Image (tube, helix red, strand yellow):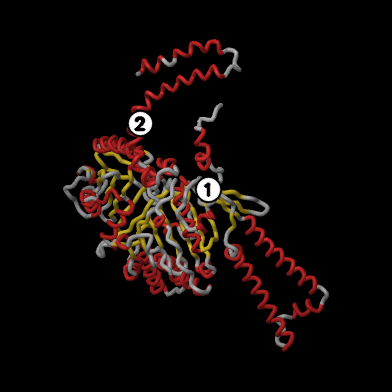
Amino acid sequence: MSDPREPGEAADAEPVLPPEPAAPAVALTVPESARRLADGEWHRLHPATPFLRGGIAFVAIIGVIVVNARDFFLDRVFGGGREFEFLERFADSSLILLAILAVLVVLLLSVGGFYLSWRMHTFRITDELVEVRSGIVFRTNRRGRLDRIQGINISRPFLARLFGAAKLEVNVAGQDANVELAYLGSAGADDLRLAILQLASGTRAAEAAAATAAAPAGVGGLVESRVNELLAPELDPNAAPPESIVRISIPRLIGSLVLSEATVIAILAAIGIITTVIATGKYGWIFALLPGLLGLFGYLASRLTRSLRYSIASTDDGIRVGYGLLSTTNETLPPGRIHAVEVSQPLLWRAAGWWEIKINTASQAASSSGATAKTTLLPVGDMNDVHRVLQLVLPSLADEKSRELLECGLAAGAHDDAYVTSPKRAAILRWFSWRRNGFVLISDAVALRKGAIWRSLVLVPQARMQSVSMNEGPLLRRMGLAELRIHTVAGPISATIGALDRGDVVRFFDEVAHAAVHAAGVDTSHRWRSAAVAPEIALAPEAAAPAAPATAAAPEVPAVLEAAAPAAIPETPATPETPAIPETPETPETPATPETPATPETPEDHA
C-alpha cells in the first residue's frame, strides 16, 4: 500500500508519530521532577520507605534489646540483684557466641529484606494508568485507570513529615481499588498529583507557561526545609482564590463535638451508671463505664485533630480539601466525581444554625486516614458556608433561583414553594415531616427534602444517576402512595424519599429519567480540561509549520475549514485516481476493472 503522505510532508510528520504505549502523550505543565516521574518509566519510592512502613517496629525491637543488654552489662560490672542470673549463666556458657551470631544474621537478613522490598517496589505513570509492582517472593501488580480516578489524597503522617516524605493515594472507582504510593518526597508528591490530574483531565496540549512558575530558591539547610514543610498550609494559596476557601474556627469545631449525638449518649450512659452505683453501692459498675469513656475520648480527640486546619477550596483540577494538625491530609476531588451530596442538621445544632455536608464517591476503600474524612466534605458550618461549598460541588446551582430553592430545602416548616410534597393522608406515616417531605428539579440536579426533627437535603447530579425506581408496598398502594429511589454509588447517602402521592411519583419518574439521559449525554466533566484545549489540539499540525507563527495560524484555520467544507465534496472526484488500480497489474483479474471508470460518473450524478 502506498504512503498517503505528500513527499514534502515526510520530515514534518515525523514528530507526529504515536509514542510508545508506556510514555505519556500529554505535554504536562508541571515541574521537571514530576514530569520525570510521569514519563511512563518505572521508578522507585522514597529511600526512607522501608523505615516508615515497617522499619519503625524493627528499630523498636532493637532498642529494647540494646536497653536490656546495657542493664545486663552494668549489672555484671557493678554488681546488683539476681534478676539477670539466667543471662549470666548463659553468658558463661559457649552458646553466647552462637546467640550473637544469630542476632547478627537476623539483623542482616532484616536489613536486606527491607532493601529488597524497596528495590522491588516500583511504580510508573502513563497517559492511561497508574501501576504499582511490589513483593519479593509473592509479587503483586495493581493498576488504576486514569479515567476512573475519583480523587487523589496526599497524607503526611507526623514521622513521615520529619523525613520530608508523603503518602500519595489514588482513589479509583471500585471496592478496594485504590493505588497507593507510600512514600514519595513531600514536595514531589504535590507536583506528581498535579501531573496525574492533568493526565486524567484530557489535556493533550501544553497550557500557558505561567501555570508552572519556577520553584523558589531552596532554604538553606535540611532542618529549615523540614520546618517549612511542617508549618506550610495544606492548601497552596496560589492554587485557589482566597474568597473560595471555607475554614472552620476552633470554638465552632469544639462546640459541634460537644453537641454531637455520641457525646450526649455517653453522658446519659454515665449518668445511668453513676445512679446505679449510688443506688446499689456496688462500685464495679464504674469499670463498665471506663471502656466507653476511653473509647469516646479517643473518638472525639481523633475527630478534633483531624478537623483542625480544615479548609475547602476550588482549584483548576477540582475541589481541594485539607485537614489535620500533626498528621495532615489533603484530597483533590476532580470534577464529576461526586455522585450525591447531603446537607444535614442534627437536632442539637439547630439553635446554632450549623450544618454538615457529606458526599458519595465511587471509591469506597477505607484508608488509614479514616473513612469519615473521605465522605465528610464539611464537618460543621453555617448557612453561608453551606452555600459556598455547594457552589464548589455543583456550580450550576449558583444562580438566584437555585439558591432560593436550596434555602427552601433547608428551612423548617411548610412552604408554598416548587417542592412537590406528601399529601395530607401521608401524615399517618410521616407525623411531623409530611408537610416538608418533597422533591424538585434544581438546574441539573435532583433535590430530595426530608425530615422535620433531623433535617436533610439530598442533591443528586442528573449526570451521575445510575437509575430511578418507584416502589409501593401493600400499605402504600392502598393509600395511593409510593416511594421514589434514585440509585447512585454506595455510600453514606441514601437518595430515597417515601410517602409521596403515586401520581406525582409517576410524573417525576418519567421527567427525571429523560433528564438524566440528556445530562449524561452532554456531560464532559470526566475530561474537564479537554474542552479548554480542544482548539489547540486541532491547530497543533498547523502551528508546527515553520512558515507562519502559531498565533497567526490560529485565527486563519477556522476560516479555511469553513470555506473548504463545501469545496471538499467536489474534490472527492479525486476518486478518479482509482484508475490507479490498473497500476496493480499483479492481479490478473483486473480485466473487470475497465468497468470501474463508471465510478467517476457516480460523483457527477451526486453532484
Q: Position of residue 477 (x, y in %)?
A: 28, 36
Measured as percent of width and height from the top left, residue 205 is found at: 43, 47
**Which residue position is annotated with label 2?**
564
Judge depth for marks 2 and 1 and give the one in front.
2
Vertical comparison of 37 with 85: above or below: above
> From the viewer's perspective, is 510 left or right of 45?
left
Helix, strand or loop at disc 1? loop
- Which kind of residue does numbered mark 1 sit on? Thr
Residue lying farthest to the bottom in this orientation: 78
Residue at mark 2 to residue at mark 1: CA–CA distance: 37 Å
Q: Label 2 is placed on what type of residue?
A: Ala
Residue extending furthest left?
Answer: 416
Along the line of sight, the residue nearer the viewer: 483 or 558: 558
Position of residue 487 measured from the top left corner of the image (x, y, whole percent): 37, 42
Kindly identify the residue that appears in the image at 74 percent across and 69 percent down.
104
Looking at the rendering, which quadrant does residue 254 occupy?
bottom left
Q: Which residue is mark 1?
A: 126
Residue shown at the point (49%, 71%) measured from the top left: 225
Q: Nearer the viewer, residue 529 or 459?
A: 529
Q: Measured along the vertical axis of the image, is residue 164 above or below residue 120?
A: below
Q: Total of numbered circles in the picture?
A: 2
Secondary structure category for the residue under label 2: helix
Q: Quadrant of residue 555?
A: top left
Q: Is residue 279 above or below residue 604?
A: below
